[in-house]
Image (spheres, rainbow, N blue to C red):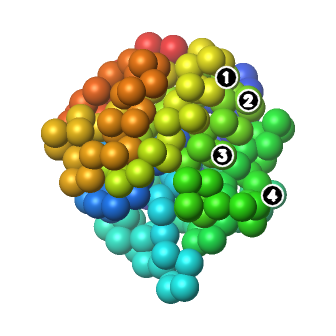
């Protein structure tokens, strides 16, 4: 595992926020597996999880990446090189001071966790440092959040719907007209690396 460092405003390379739903575990494995072990960013993931069952997503994803993967906890200060997964039945958000926040507010797009609260709160906290990624999924979650990220100067990457197991989320994001890159899932990690190292 890589060493991790608390995020500070002066040395953060970026905040990568990721939305995924149906078919998303495979795409998440591809994305996370392609990220450098010394990633100068924190990764926050809103993956639609079933509320009534224990999740094994951390152990599944940990086998495919050199980054540290964990369920996010309320009030935690995120660290570079770590992937934080929204736990079942909780929205994951970023507070203005950069601390993580878990809420049980109403489902968004019928989901909790959902991408839109994560994207919107990260955009408010970190503005142009945000890289938002929308992966496979059957609904429109993430589209509203994509617009918030772009409004505050962030970058948006969407999985090519032709490579997505479910095309609803990528297509809805693309339909906003606020997307910078449309890539197959195996190309997203490299694009994130390039963006982070040109800042």
Q: Earlier in the sequence, mark 1 or mark 3?
A: 3
Q: Nearer the viewer, mark 4 or mark 3?
A: 3
Q: Residue at x 23, y 47 (%)?
A: 164
Gap in Å between the C-alphas at discs 2 and 1? 6 Å
State the residue in front, 166 or 9.
166
Q: Nearer the viewer, mark 1 or mark 4?
A: 1
Gap in Å between the C-alphas at discs 4 and 3? 16 Å
Crowdedness near tag 3: few (<14), some (14–19) or many (≥20) residues, C-alpha within 10 Å: many
- Label for residue 124? 2
In the image, residue 14 lies at what x, y percent? 56, 29
- Label for residue 75? 4
Contact flag, marks 2 and 1 (Cβ < 8 Å): yes
Secondary structure at badge 2 equals helix
Crowdedness near tag 1: few (<14), some (14–19) or many (≥20) residues, C-alpha within 10 Å: many
Q: Earlier in the sequence, mark 1 or mark 4?
A: 4
Crowdedness near tag 4: few (<14), some (14–19) or many (≥20) residues, C-alpha within 10 Å: few
Residue 106 falls left or right of residue 137: right
């Amino acid at each position: 595992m890589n060493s991790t460092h608390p995020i500070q405003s002066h040395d953060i390379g970026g905040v990568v926020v990721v939305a995924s739903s149906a078919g998303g575990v495979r795409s998440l494995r591809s994305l996370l597996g392609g990220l450098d072990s010394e990633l100068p960013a924190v990764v926050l993931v809103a993956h639609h999880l079933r509320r009534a069952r224990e999740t094994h997503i951390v152990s599944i994803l940990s086998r495919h990446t050199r980054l540290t993967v964990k369920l996010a906890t309320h009030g935690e200060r995120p660290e570079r090189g770590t992937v934080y997964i929204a736990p079942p039945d909780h929205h994951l958000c970023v507070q203005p001071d950069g601390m993580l926040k878990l809420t049980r507010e109403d489902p968004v797009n019928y989901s909790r966790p959902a991408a839109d609260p994560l994207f919107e709160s990260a955009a408010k906290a970190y503005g142009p440092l945000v890289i938002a990624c929308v992966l496979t999924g059957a609904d429109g979650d993430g589209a509203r959040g994509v617009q918030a990220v772009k409004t505050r100067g962030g970058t948006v990457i969407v999985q090519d719907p032709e490579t997505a197991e479910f095309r609803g989320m990528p297509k809805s994001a693309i339909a906003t007209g606020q997307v910078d890159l449309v890539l197959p899932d195996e190309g997203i990690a490299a694009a994130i690396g390039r963006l982070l190292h040109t800042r």
